[in-house]
Image: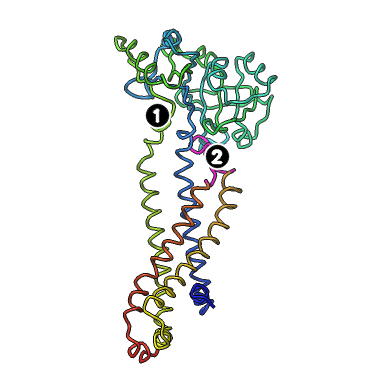
């Protein structure tokens, strides 16, 4: 029997207590993996943003519109290959008004050229371009709304009041993580022509595709300089910066999740430390006998820290084995379909699993440090005298 084997076998001396500890720590690991997945998934659109796209919005805020004529000026800027425009529509499903989903009024032809990761079958693409009331619906959103190609769908306007009837011309998928599959896009012309004259010819923001990703900042600065003398000035940024600005609006939520994650780790540490401390108290006389046989204080400390690390390892493996299928199974599909605007891709990253395993091992070892130090200080006489 090696020292490592003996330390590991000590973890099974009280199997019921050890199993309860592993169960409690596993629950903490599952919660940790879930919360970290929320944070990584929230930032994933920014991480996978296209490097050759920049976005121009009103300098003050996203909610302030720009004149549509700006698009022609942007297209003339050196370095811009193509540009499209979008407006946030803010429509709801009247059958379920509490169900949020992203919906935009776009220019169909240029939209598909700028967002080339949006994949649509050729016949559906043609149908969308030709139908003024046509719409593209993400595959996840289509399942959520229960619609298919050829169906009519009515959106209840909020920013643009009224009932808006659209035809589902196509179902799109995304070939990159930079664009979610839970959005709806329809013709900007259809929306614009239905508005009062005072609200026409206004767009939300402009997205440009540039010929050299390395010139993004330069091209953006050029666009902003052009409009510096206009009544409506612009702020141009990379797609990554634009996505991060959306995430920034929820920074308080992300901070709260980070705090909760820290609390979970602290609870994990306390659960392990309590189990190890109880085991050390019960086996104090045994450690005295080992010392009498010639084992050093370092050996005693090794046994205790080895035992706590073994429990941490077992709990980490169990927690990961449960968390991975839970998150990547039914939960990922549910969140992508119902919250795709915020979580276009909800999966457990390998880095999250590795981090969870490392923390389980590290906290397991840390939980045994104090009991190990105390046990190492006991003299042989005092240890043998103590009877639990």
Q: Is residue 335 above or below residue 2?
A: above
Residue 341 is one of the magenta-drawn residues = yes
Kindly give the residue lying farthest to the front in the view shown: 294
Determine whether, in the image, residue 126 is placed left or right of residue 116. Answer: right
Image coordinates for residue 164, horizontal then vertical, percent: 55, 22
- Residue 349 in percent (x, y) is at 52, 46
**Mark 1 Cα shell of 10 Å, populated few (<14), some (14-19), many (≥20):** some
Q: Characterize the local packing of mark 2: few (<14), some (14-19) or many (20 or more) Cα atoms within 10 angstroms.
A: many
Q: Secondary structure at mark 1?
A: helix
Q: Which residue is mark 2?
A: 338
Residue 153: in magenta span: no
Q: Can you tell which mark lies on residue 144?
A: none
Give the residue displayed 69% in from the left and 24% down from the top.
Answer: 150
Instruction: Specify the principal SS of the magenta part.
Output: loop
Provide the residue designation for mark 1: 241
- Give the quadrant of residue 363: bottom left
Q: Mark 2 or mark 1: which is in front?
A: 1
Question: Foreground residue, 376 or 150?
Answer: 376
Say if 297 sits above or below 178 in the image.
Answer: below
Q: Which residues are magenta?
A: 333-349
């Amino acid at each position: 029997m090696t020292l490592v084997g003996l330390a590991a076998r000590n973890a099974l001396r009280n199997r019921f207590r050890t199993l309860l500890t592993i169960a409690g720590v596993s629950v903490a690991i599952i919660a940790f993996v879930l919360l970290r997945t929320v944070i990584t998934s929230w930032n994933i659109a920014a991480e996978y943003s296209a490097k050759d796209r920049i976005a121009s919005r009103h300098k003050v805020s996203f909610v302030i519109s720009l004149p549509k004529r700006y698009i022609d000026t942007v297209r003339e800027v050196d370095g811009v290959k193509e540009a499209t425009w979008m407006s946030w529509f803010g429509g709801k499903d009247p059958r379920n008004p509490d169900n949020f989903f992203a919906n935009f009024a776009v220019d169909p032809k240029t939209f598909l050229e700028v967002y080339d990761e949006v994949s649509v079958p050729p016949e559906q693409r043609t149908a969308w371009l030709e139908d003024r009331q046509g719409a593209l619906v993400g595959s996840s959103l289509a399942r959520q709304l229960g619609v298919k190609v050829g169906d009519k769908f009515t959106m209840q306007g909020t920013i643009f009041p009224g009932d808006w009837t659209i035809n589902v011309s196509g179902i799109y998928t995304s070939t990159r993580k930079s664009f979610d599959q839970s959005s709806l896009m329809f013709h900007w012309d259809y929306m614009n022509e239905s508005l009062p004259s005072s609200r026409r010819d206004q767009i939300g923001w402009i997205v440009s595709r540039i010929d050299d990703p390395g010139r993004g900042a330069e091209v953006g600065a050029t666009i902003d300089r052009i409009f510096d003398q206009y009544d409506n000035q612009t702020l141009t940024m990379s797609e990554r910066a634009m996505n991060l600005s959306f995430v920034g609006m929820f920074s308080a939520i992300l901070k709260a999740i980070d705090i909760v994650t820290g609390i979970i780790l602290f609870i994990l540490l306390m659960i392990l430390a309590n189990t190890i401390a109880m085991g050390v108290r019960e086996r104090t006389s045994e450690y005295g006998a080992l010392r009498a046989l010639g084992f050093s204080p370092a050996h005693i400390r090794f046994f205790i820290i080895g035992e706590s690390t073994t429990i941490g390892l077992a709990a980490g493996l169990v927690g990961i084995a449960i968390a991975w299928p839970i998150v990547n199974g039914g939960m990922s599909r549910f969140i992508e379909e119902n919250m795709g605007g915020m979580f276009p891709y909800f999966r457990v990253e390998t880095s999250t699993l590795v981090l969870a395993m490392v923390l389980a091992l590290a906290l397991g070892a840390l939980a045994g440090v104090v009991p190990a130090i105390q046990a190492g200080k006991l003299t042989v006489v005092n240890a043998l005298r103590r009877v639990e």
